[in-house]
Amino acid sequence: MRCVAQTYDWGIKGSGSTVGRLYALGTSGSAAAAKDDVPYAELWMGTHPSGPSLVLPSAKPDQSGSPCTVLVKNDAAEGEPQLLQDWLDAHPEALGATVQQKWPGQLPFLFKVLSVAKALSIQAHPDKRLAEQLHATQPKNYKDDNHKPEMALAVTPFEALCGFVTSRELRESIQSVPELRMAIGEHHADSVLRAGKNGVNGVNGVNGAHEAQECAEQRAFKDAFRALMTQDGDVIQTHLSSLVARLQHESKARELTDKEQLVRRLEQQYPGDVGVLSAFFLNHVTLQPGQAICLAANEPHAYLAGECIECMAASDNVVRAGLTPKYRDTDTLCSMLTYKQGCPQLLNGTPITPHVSVYTPPFDEFEVEKISVPLGQTAALPEISGPSILLVFRGSGAISVAPANGMNKVHGSAAAVAAAPSYVQGVHVGDVFFVPAGSHKLLASAVVETDGEDSEPVLEMYRARVNVQAQ
């Protein structure tokens, strides 16, 4: 497939961006084609109308000049590229019976690569009901009516703000950061502190009071967050400037805390923005390569730096309230959040073969496989009944395709993988394939390219597929 690169302001520029490199390799065959002054932020793989993928003609030479066949047959007239959605409309059997029944005519997930140079907005994604309301009332700002649970899988150290800190952590910040206290307002800051003090003084010892205490703390937390996010811009700018000046002075005498260093960095990227102070309300985490984080609907987050594989329900709905020049819908954001507190759970992947690990979030629309095949070895990819998208992330090699049951077709001639029982497809970094639903076997082997462009000791691929538990 040929996929779309989104060039948002926060992206990493040029071939230093994994998105830029993959996009350039996938469209021109050379990473050098990435433009140095372009911020390559996201590579989109799927059918979403804001960045739809194209299915390329079925028969074309691979980068070595040898004929090859892609993993989906494009029957478009005269071998012209065709929108993946149009191809699926013509060949609905490629989605498989279960997906077709649950998401008629639709690929339910959107697959991405992200290259983040500076912070994305303080944001959350709506649940299905809210998405339908927002799309109906504000179609310009919310372009579809779907929810958007998502998962980010780090391929470099990847920083993010996600989920709310505990009430105790917020109290500590209010007590140690006077500028935050003033930006929130004395009334709301005192409410947070009083709610915590009541618990310390033993209210939790009374029958049923533990729940009441938690409700009081969460209510105070929620009110304080809303008070900050809706505070007058001049007030925010005044207190944020004072905070940054103080931290600059104190950094000469002591080591700043992790959150203080983050605040200084965010303020340089978004001067005077309320989102900088909101960092005190959110967990600051750094994923290591191979770790993933799941983000359900109505949970606050902001990606800060690094690169990741991302998968989500097929939507582009984002409710923003800080760290952005884009449209802010602060009232909606503050109202929609669950205000769950505590550190988010990380996924490390579940090995299902020596070369394949799967990351399964609690969402029906998707899960992601990480496939790593060392040089000279061959790995069988798990057989699945639904559709998938396969990204060659690093290295080069070959994929052998064979029907599982001695058949040479997958759900009829429209999605036939070959006229013979099996064939071999050369794969290179930057290639993206749509794999139709059906019982077929895929064997991946790693090789070294003679031109050295992508000579890696491993063939690394990522495959997005429908959550097997939902099929």
Image (cartoon, rainbow, N blue to C red):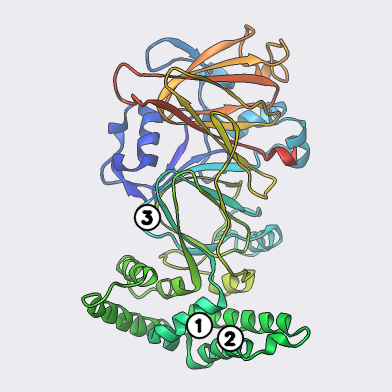
Q: What residue sits right under mark 3 in the picture?
A: 10
- Secondary structure at badge 3 equals loop
**Residue 309 location, x and y as percent?**
49, 43
Which of the pair 362/255 is nearer the observer? 255
Q: Kindly report the distance in space between the C-alpha atoms of the residues bearing marks 1 and 2.
A: 8 Å
Residue plotted at (62% across, 64% down):
298
First in sequence: mark 2 vs mark 3: 3
Report if residue 63 is visible in the image: yes
| Residue at the limit of the structure toward the top, as seen here | 420
Three-letter amino acid code at the position of disc 3: Trp
Position of residue 469 in the picture relative to residue 22 (left or right): right
First in sequence: mark 1 vs mark 2: 1
Q: Tell us which disc is closer to us: 1 or 3.
A: 1
On screen, residue 470 above or below 444: below
- How many residues crowd around disc 3 within 10 Å: few (fewer than 14), some, or many (20 or more)? many
On screen, residue 364 above or below 94: below
First in sequence: mark 1 vs mark 3: 3
Three-letter amino acid code at the position of disc 2: Gly
The reply to whether dot 1 and dot 2 touch (C-beta < 8 Å) is yes
On screen, residue 62 above or below 465: above
**Residue 178 location, x and y as percent?**
39, 87
On screen, residue 239 above or below 160: below
Report if residue 75 is visible in the image: no
- How many residues crowd around disc 1 within 10 Å: few (fewer than 14), some, or many (20 or more)? many
Q: Which mark is residue 196?
A: 2
Which of the pair 132/342 is nearer the observer? 342
- Secondary structure at badge 2 equals helix
